[in-house]
Amino acid sequence: MKNDHSKMWVFLLFIITVFVLLTPFVNGAKLDTLSKKAGWGRGKMAASERGYYEYRLRAIGNKWRKTFVDHGYNRDGLARDGYDSFLVIDTLNGAMWVETRGNIARQDYCDLPANMKWKIYRTSNGKNEDIPKVLKLKMRGIWTGQEYPEMYCFHGIDRSKDSFSIYVTSGDIFTDYGGSGYNIQNWEKPAKPINTENYFKPLIVSDAEWLAYQNKYGTAAIPQNSDKDNQNQEAKLYDSLKKICQYIELETARHGHKLDYLHRYEIASNYNAIKGEMSLDDDGGSIIPIRRRRIHEDNLFRAQLLDDDLWYVQTFPEENGRIRPNDEVLNFAFAMQDGKILSKADFKKLSDDIKDRFAVEAPINPDWIQKMANGAEVELLGICYRPSFGGKWWGPDGKYLEYEPYYGSESGGMSNKDEICYYDIAFRIYWPSGTNRTSNSVTSIKSITPGTTGSTGMSSGGNHPASRIYLLNVQANKDLNELDVQVDIELQKQKPQSVVFRAIPLAPGNSKNFKITVDSN
């Protein structure tokens, strides 16, 4: 009898072991070793996993919207003939991509978070309806107010109590993480019934439309991860970004901290540099107040491509904002080559000047800088059409810049028909020596030219970087050639000081009227 019990326990132990080993693969994707170590694809979503997919999937959506704008549209906002670009979300195989005329570029293809089941539906006019697990969407029109009021919702579930959601509308794509589940969305039914004949067709592509597309262009080939020889620099960067995020998760834990969020990515237009921000989880430490850990929440990092597939990643504790006395901050560096982190010995062999090999930062130009009476200095760094990602910046002298003053965003602010243009204008603020550690400041930057809109700014506590770059987004009529921008800075609750940058050129080559004046208050 005792022997039978022993056999039964051995059998149960075998079944449990098999179940544990197979659980990560029940819902799909197999995990590589690095993903497993970083906590991706299993259980509660790792912070780096959330941060990577939130950025990456939005970028795919922005690429899809851009295909519509680049193709062109008529005065009614409808695409011109021949527009054949689709956003495909395949929850069966766990992938999302942009497909154009039978082709899928490697940089426009991304997997979905691994080992999730997906709840998907369309919500419109007060009703929700199930939709296919492989969904094809096509932009029908834009910027007329006649986009059909609908939303496509994807909730990734069944990993712990987590959820990762993707929402697609005619004008935007956004993502959301739910640490305790998800909420069903419902596009409320309007007070008056909607006459759908007055709106563009829904985004969803019918089976007949998709079949006609495939008969015309053939079936697109899904990009393979192993096909690295045919990747361009953009595709290589996204593959590297995924591994960089995972290594940041591991390095943060190795230094005794818990990563809470990875976000605010900026990517250089030549895809050789990445900036971002890491938020740490303050666990409170010891219950004894005198021994309580003070975790600095927001930490900056930067990654630079130094050589073929050699990335150098570094935190910048001296540039973090609002650091309190005795705060613990992240301070580490590592190098990654061919997707693998270098050993300590190989890391030490790298040149001593490695920190100086980053992409050129915006240099100080005395002609574009103005000092205020309160000691603060304001510098105009450059102007670019929005979205500035991949664009060419110019200075107030009308000449193109040899550097990027700000790594622009891929999203937002694409020109509206033939009437409105959008600009990114970068400024750098220098606070008086020492005041960034001792006094509060309030910065406001706004366009003051009639018929334009745009403002930015922030309140900074007594601990912030000695200088900071601000990005002003401006909307202006396309026939406008120049623009006035006012910068206000208040230090230690004193009366604000103002400086006005007049006649900022809204196109390269136009600079003869530019000047800087200080307005007395």
Image: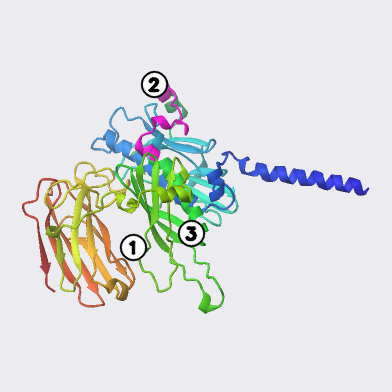
Per the image, the residue denoted by label 3 is 260
Q: Where is residue 146 in the image (x, y as percent from the top left)?
A: 32, 43
Q: What stretch is highlighted in magenta?
A: 213-236
Q: Camera-side residue: 474 or 231?
A: 231
Q: Which of label 3 and label 2 is nearer to you?
A: 3
Q: Residue 468 carries which label?
A: none
Tell me the colour scheme of the image: rainbow
SS state under label 3: strand
Residue drawn at the location 65% of the way across and 44% of the way down: 23
Task: Say if the magenta span includes residue 129.
Answer: no
Q: Camera-side residue: 323 or 52?
A: 323
Q: Position of residue 359 (x, y in %)?
A: 29, 48
Q: Earlier in the sequence, mark 2 or mark 1?
A: 2
Residue drawn at the location 51% of the way across and 60% of the way down: 258
User: Rounded to the nearest whole Å, what is the CA distance between mark 3 and mark 1?
Assistant: 20 Å
SS state under label 2: helix
Per the image, the residue denoted by label 2 is 216
Asked whether the residues under the numbered discs 2 and 1 touch, taking CB atoms below 8 Å apart as contact, a structural biologist would say no
Asked whether the residues under the numbered discs 3 and 1 touch, taking CB atoms below 8 Å apart as contact, a structural biologist would say no
Q: Which of marks 3 and 1 is nearer the N terminus?
A: 3
Q: Position of residue 27 (x, y in %)?
A: 60, 40
Q: Which residue lies furthest to the left in this view?
A: 512
Residue drawn at the location 20% of the way across and 76% of the way down: 495
In the image, what residue type sits under mark 2?
Lys
Q: Judge left or right: residue 329 versus residue 482.
A: right
Q: Residue 319 carries which label?
A: 1
Which quarter of the rendered picture does the C terminus lie within?
A: bottom left
Q: Judge left or right: residue 158 versus residue 168.
A: right
| Disc 1 residue crowd, few under 14, some 14–19, many 20+, Cα 10 Å | some
In terms of image quadrants, where is residue 181? Answer: bottom right
In the image, what residue type sits under mark 3?
Asp
